[in-house]
Image (cartoon, helix red, strand yellow):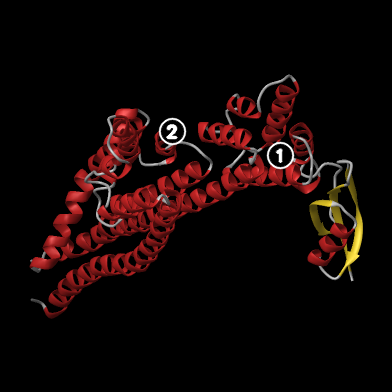
Amino acid sequence: MANFFYTALNASGGEQQGNIEADNAQTAAAQLRGQNLFILEVKPAGRNHSAVPGTGGADGWNRWLPVFAGDKINFFRQFALLLRSGHTIVQALDLYAQFATKRGLSLACQRMSQQVKNGARLADAFEKENLFSSEVKHLITAGEESGELERVLVRLAHNMERRRDLKNQLITVSVYPSIVFLASIAVLYMVIAVVVPKFARFFAARQTEMPPLTQLLIDISNWVQDYGGYVSGGFLVFIFVSLAAYTQPAGKRVIDRFMIMIPLIGTAIRDSSIAQASITLSMLLRSGLSILDSLRIGAKVVSNDYLSQVIYRASEQILKGQSFAQSMIHPSIPGLVTSMIDVGERSGELSEVLDELGEFYSNQLAQRIKFLTTFIEPAMILFVGGIVAFVYFAIFQAIFQASTGG
């Protein structure tokens, strides 16, 4: 039997902490639920526990970090659980403010609770918090009007989690090749700018005519030494200008359009954007929002600004009388998407079709990332290996020629 420390809410909504003996954490949680307690936390005893989880002990520093997507996902899920257990909105906000692991989220809950006490709607309270997007405000509004706030919160948390996973996958497909490529360039530069000049001085002292391959290598090394600094400086300036342009709407749109034109990586970015949009649109439509409002909100969650504009323009086409499927026809949107949307409109199951599209393109993205990570590593090895082989044969020819007196 092990000893576990727990934090829970009793029937009156008060926080209760203590220790319980059980075989494992799951058994401990089951015993606590049998005592009509709402479990907030169960973990092995023996650690430094504070009255409010996350405010002291070894994890106290974490409380001052920014609020990340994972914190918001946890908030929406626990907020829904508190409402499901019979707490009012104000009680749920006040309770979460006590055990929130991030100070920013705790303060936000306190402010929203006070606004609701003063007669404001929950959606309006969310809108005033910079932590949450306009998507959240619209969904909370739909949940309040339909009486399904708890279900909307759970759906919102699930949707945010799926979008976070997509974003992480996209970062993987972008960062991994970049790191491998930069490492390859660093190895190439070291060989040409550091190793080759030493051999060049050795052969020059012998005053022998170099083989063509060796002379080519020495010429490349000399060029890198003479102009490599200018090339590196120009590259850094290009990166700086690109990053500066990316902070502006017009520049971001141009760069994002260029990104989706890159072979393999561009397709992965497109799949990620379509999956993000489809998942969000499905959730918004299930929550009772119109197609027009769903498109305008859904466009904001797409990370690629160019594709975001394509989706937003679709809402303008709907205002002109076009169907959803017709408004989505664009060179950057695969025909499968418009075809499936058309089927969903005709069958009256648009939200289900969009959810399936999101799942399909999420799986497509995972497969592309797996292919890229599998393909890039051997390709980089061959690239670096080819350079090393070229240097080796060039130097070996010169050594062989010098040793034979040729």
Left or right of residue 356: residue 265: left
Is residue 210 in view from this perspective?
no
Residue underneath mark 1: 63
- Residue at 62% across, 38% down: 67
Residue lying farthest top? 118
Mark 1 vs mark 2, foreground winner is 2
Q: Quadrant of the C terminus?
A: bottom left
The type of residue carrying mark 1 is: Arg
Is residue 32 in view from this perspective?
yes
The image position of residue 397, as x and y in percent, is 15, 74
The type of residue carrying mark 2 is: Asp
Residue underneath mark 2: 293
Classify 64 as above or below 179. Answer: above
Classify 145 as above or below 279. Answer: above
The image position of residue 390, as x and y in percent, is 20, 68
Q: Earlier in the sequence, mark 1 or mark 2?
A: 1
Front residue of 330/365: it is: 330
Callout 2 environment at 10 Å: few (<14), some (14 to 19), or many (20+)? some
Q: Quadrant of residue 101?
A: top right
- Residue at 31% across, 50% down: 342
Q: Quadrant of the N terminus?
A: bottom right
Front residue of 363/84: it is: 84
Front residue of 317/244: it is: 317
Classify 269 as above or below 388. Answer: above
Number of numbered discs present? 2
- Residue at 69% across, 27% down: 112
- Residue at 68% across, 30% down: 108
The image position of residue 188, as x and y in percent, is 28, 59
